[in-house]
Image (cartoon, rainbow, N blue to C red):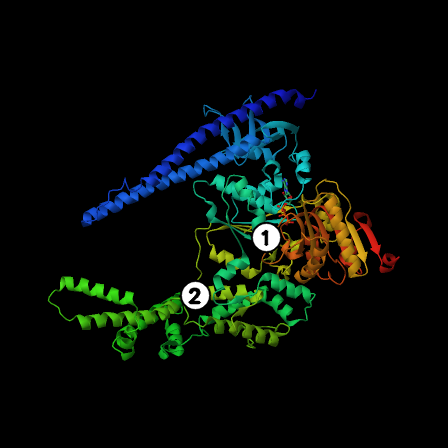
Amino acid sequence: MDEKEKDWPEEEKRVELVVRQVKKSIKKLSKYAKTLKNRVIDIRKDFWDDVTVNLSEMDDIIETQASLKQQAEFLSERERSHGQLSKQLDKLERMRDTPYFGRIDFVENDQNVYDSIYIGTTSLMDEQENEFLVYDWRAPIASLYYDYPPGPAKYQAIDEEIEGEITLKRQYVIRQGELKGMFDTGLTIGDHLLQSVLGKSADTQMKSIVATIQQEQNKIIRNERSKMLVVQGVAGSGKTSAALQRVAYLLYRYREQLTSDQIILFSPNPLFNSYVSTVLPELGEDNMKQTTFYHYIEQQLGNRFVIESPFDQIEYYLQKNGELKDPRIASMSFKASLAFKEQVDHLLERLKRDGMTFRNVRFRGDLIVGKEKIRNYFYALPSSLSIPVRLEKVMQWLLKELKKIEKTEEMADWVLEETQLLDKDDYQEAFQSLEEEYAYQSDVFDDRNREEAILRKKVIKQKLHPLRKKIKRFHFFDVKNTYIQLFSNQTDQHDVFPDHWDLMCQDTKSNIRENFLTWEDATPFLYFERMCIGFHENRSIQHIFVDEAQDYSVFQLAYLQKVYPNSRMTLLGDINQAIYLHSLEDVNPLSPEEKGGQERITLLRSYRSTRPIVEFTKSWMPNGEKIESFHRSGRLPDVIEVDNRDIALDKVITAMENDQQNDYKTIAVITKTMKQSRSLYQQLKRSFPEVTLIDFDTHTYQKGFNVIPAYLAKGIEFDSVIVWDASREQYQDELERNLLYTACTRAMHELTVISIGELSDYIRKAPRETFTCYKVHAIEKQK
Ligand SMILES: Nc1ncnc2c1ncn2[C@@H]1O[C@H](COP(=O)(O)OP(=O)(O)OP(=O)(O)O)[C@@H](O)[C@H]1O
């Protein structure tokens, strides 16, 4: 009998004991929660009984207000406590099922007794509240479990480092409050357990990985030092999982200072938002804010511009097969480059001396302040002042000018005419202010004139209101015409003009004048505008997480850093999955070049896919030999080369039928473009009416069959993936290769790649033993 078997009865007893304690705590808390709930209901019901309302004298009014405030605070304090209790109860409910998942026996140096530390998703004390029955996985001591194999180990307690030895490291499978299995493990936590977790079906919601966090992932989760943490992780290495556990860790570690609304996650697409939305609540934490960069830009500029989405941009690129001779594609590449950012910064520098363009300020068609005058005022301000400060001063000056207009126009005839058009409420208000005035001056008997004066003031205020608002929003500054100075033939801006320069200038100018921003223009324009009028800094956000960070341009990251100056950044991505032209720049945050001011963690092991899928996909990627697979077995990927679309469709249908027989829950047919997805969907619907098409606006996806373009599948995974048309014609350049890699690496258990015509050269590079190849010719089909 080995140690483990010997311990089984004792371990079983301990599970029972802890579950009993959990149940007791649930009972106690439920009782308390019920009382609190009733109390809240009572307070709400009797709210007014306990408030002293007396409005006769000023003193009474103040007293009433104070009494109201006190009562409201009392109520909200109870409501808050009730909310916290409910959360605590939810955590305990989860513990009733799985109270803990791991244990280490740790003996501190210079002591001779070991402590058994049991680790679960939440801490639990014994009844006397003397001892921890279970430690929260985020507690300092729990880091031992993730960081060390049995042997010498240390951890950072609040104010000291504690060294000692781990004498046992054990993993449990506890379900429905019963011990089902246990394993003693080395460094890799529960290879055995990981196998079984990863072998399960993919879900439409991501899972929490607390029980099996790996050492490298733990470094990401518990990193507290870096202002900028960059994680380069191969496909399926657990970047997103680690990021979410990191959010949970930070919320626990800094629970006194940090709340979930001080954390933002920038995710790649709306689908992904819902995919990860359950992880934190599963851990008993509130979700952080989540957005996509596109959504964010839309919020900033969407009321003034129509903004192309990144997905439309990528569609354009893919449909043109990345043809660099295409002027639009040349423009995308140029506008995302560091060279262009330098030009924008150069223009901003020049604008300090010259070049700011303004608009005339007019009121009812009359010129109030001309653009030249504004320009002169701006450039007469001390040049030591920044552009935003000078614009602010111009704004103040213009507002003063408006005040003057208010005075001079008051007696104009048009104002009197307009008073007739005021509505009932305005008259009522005027009447009231007259009454108040007369209350103090009972000898004045000039009400007609006084009323007219009040109404005139009202009219002029109302009429000037929109203009005042515009001035406060810097409408007098002609940002569009100032920005498009970048697109001229001025030689001080360029050493060499990029390809298709004239056409690029023409298109950019006309788009911007028509209030349309292509995706490549959107962030540079916004960056430029904010550098002029000032950034609305958000100082409350403490942490930003950027997933798929390889797809962000220099502008986008520079922008985020400016808007969230107080925030620490965690950038997660995979250079091999870069699918935007700008991602190929050296400045890509995930590119291997060392950059100052960052800490870098690299994840090389892929957990998502079976070993055969990882071996196949890595063989055609640069530095692929560094990618490690987790030893999970599976079938070799099928690669099917056919010579026409009809046979390809047949093959997709057969693969889908097989997936159905294998009982796979989530199956995706992944295409290169949206256009392909749409047409394939129409055809597949005839054989599988339940198939779903995922497009730009899909926010959640269902189990079953999905048809989806590769760039929308970023970040998510499926049991089985069928890649539609991986032919040479479709996948040629570097971005297309990355897209193909992204598509194939979405598969957890099964991968089928279909090519109409000759296979893409990338796949041809894969060693023959990494996939099963079939060639199906039309002639064979006719037989
Ligand atoms: N330590 C772990 N324990 C259990 N499962 C894990 C672990 N790490 C990763 N996984 C699983 O591996 C899969 C991939 O994880 P995740 O999506 O976080 O990877 P990723 O690096 O963000 O992938 P990609 O860049 O390809 O989108 C998920 O199913 C996740 O649950």
Mark 2 or mark 1: which is in front? 1
Q: Earlier in the sequence, mark 2 or mark 1?
A: 1
The verdict on label 2 being within 8 Å of ligand 1 is no
Specify few, some or many for label 2: CA neighbours under 10 Å numbering under 14, 14-19, or 20 or more. Answer: some
Circle 1 residue: 271
Q: Tell me the kind of residue under disc 2.
A: Ile
Give the position of the N terminus as an image quadrant. top right
Q: How many marks?
A: 2
Q: Residue at x 13, y 68 (%)?
A: 444
Note whether 470 is above or below 182 in the view shown.
below
Direction from residue 304 to residue 671 in the image, left or right: right
Residue 19 picture location, percent across and down? 54, 26
Give the position of the C terminus as an image quadrant. bottom right
Note whether 735 is above or below 80 in the view shown.
below
Q: Any mark on residue 312, and which?
A: none
Residue 31 picture location, percent across and down? 43, 30
Question: Alpha-carbon distance for marks 2 and 1?
Answer: 34 Å
Circle 2 residue: 533
| Viewer can see residue 223 | no
Q: Between 318 and 226, which is closer to the camera in this rendering?
A: 318
Specify few, some or many for label 1: CA neighbours under 10 Å numbering under 14, 14-19, or 20 or more. Answer: many
Q: Between 305 and 581, which is closer to the camera in this rendering?
A: 305
Mark 2 element type: helix
Q: Tell me the kind of residue under disc 1.
A: Leu
Note whether 32 is above or below 313 in the view shown.
above
Q: Between 425 and 717, which is closer to the camera in this rendering?
A: 425
| Viewer can see residue 744 | yes
**Which residue lies most toward the left here?**
443
Ligand 1 appears in which quadrant?
Answer: top right
Residue 569 picture location, percent across and down? 52, 50
